Image: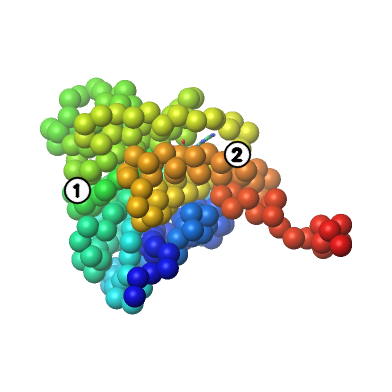
Amino acid sequence: MPRPVPAVLSIAGSDSGGGAGIQADLKAFARCGVHGMTAITALTAQSTVGVTGIHPVPGEFIIEQVRTVAADIGVDAVKIGMLGTAETVRAVREALGHIEDGVPIVIDPVMVAESGAVLLDDEARAAIVRELLPLATVITPNLPEARVLAAGAERAGATERGRDDVEDLARALHGLGPANVVVTGGHRDEVTDVFFDGTSVTLLAGERHPDGAAHGSGCTHSSALAAHLALGFSPQEAARAARRLASEAVRDGHRSIGRGPGPVNVLGVAVRAVTPDRLARQA
Ligand SMILES: Nc1ncnc2c1ncn2[C@@H]1O[C@H](COP(=O)(O)OP(=O)(O)O)[C@@H](O)[C@H]1O
Ligand SMILES: Cc1ncc(COP(=O)(O)OP(=O)(O)O)c(N)n1
């Protein structure tokens, strides 16, 4: 029987503070109207100010999570987030064997949390480039991640040296094998996402919300993009929709949750929450 709504799988880490990682992914999936599923790669003890511990999930159990949901529910799109170690990258590569060929895969090559904590080691970065990027429908690095990945490509002789223009970075990253590249704009003044499909560059512009809260914006963006691919949108349309949703989530973000950069708010929950006071006023 066909699924009533598309089912989207996040293979990513848990953020105990609820701002990024699978917690952000499930909220973005709900906002987009798809059924969200998770295969957790690592537990982080994380808040808005930092990460105090990382507990990787054994590779075999990552594979089991994917195999189990794929066999019963099925998967219409995959989003891959925090991986952490090369062993995890290899397990995720194997887990993808349980998902039907042709299912779109979005890879957010998470390296550093907004608080500054490192979430990916060097060996894992090389493994992602080698094992996963060639399988991606879309990759969604932010600017620092794009620079690191492109520098690796230069060392491998795949690109010209010294290029740092964002459009050139997107072209260089396309050379690593993904079908489409979005370099997200949160780390640039104009906050324009740069989309490259191997032929042409499209600039996805929008409003900047300097007073918003952006912890989890990358996770929200890549999950919304995967959800829109599952809903049948083209990669470029999905990237445009994801940019808009992520931007609104930053605008509506909770600046005063935690002492560090606050979490995005993709569901607008502060506006919708029913409190005893609001209920009494409506009565
Ligand atoms: N201040 C902001 N105003 C509007 N949109 C933003 C802002 N910060 C980030 N975004 C959007 O959120 C998404 C994630 O971007 P980015 O912050 O670059 O990722 P990451 O969280 O991985 O560093 C992108 O679509 C970007 O354009
Ligand atoms: C468990 C986990 N995964 C990913 C991130 C990074 O998330 P991102 O959306 O890029 O947001 P920032 O942390 O950069 O605001 C994370 N922190 N934790």
At label 2, counting other C-alpha atoms closer than 10 Å, the crowd grade (few under 14, some 14-19, many 20 or more) is many
Confirm if mark 2 falls within 8 A of ligand 1. yes
Q: Amino acid at mark 2?
A: Arg
SS for dot 2: helix
- Would you place residue 6 above or below residue 181 in this image? below
Q: Position of residue 254 (x, y in %)?
A: 64, 46
| Residue that numbered label 1 is attached to | 134
Q: Amino acid at mark 1?
A: Pro
| Residue that numbered label 2 is attached to | 251
**Is residue 210 among the parts visible in the rendering?**
yes
Q: Which corner quadrant holds the C terminus? A: bottom right
What residue is drawn where x is 56% and y is 57%?
Answer: 18
SS for dot 1: helix
The answer to whether residue 251 is left or right of residue 81 is right
Give residue 197's mark. Answer: none
Residue in front for this viewpoint, 184 or 124: 184
What residue is drawn where x is 56% and y is 41%?
Answer: 248
Marks 2 and 1, how far apart at CA = 34 Å
Ranked by sequence position, the earlier of labels 2 and 1 is 1
Q: Which corner quadrant holds the N terminus? A: bottom left
What residue is drawn where x is 29% and y is 54%?
Answer: 105
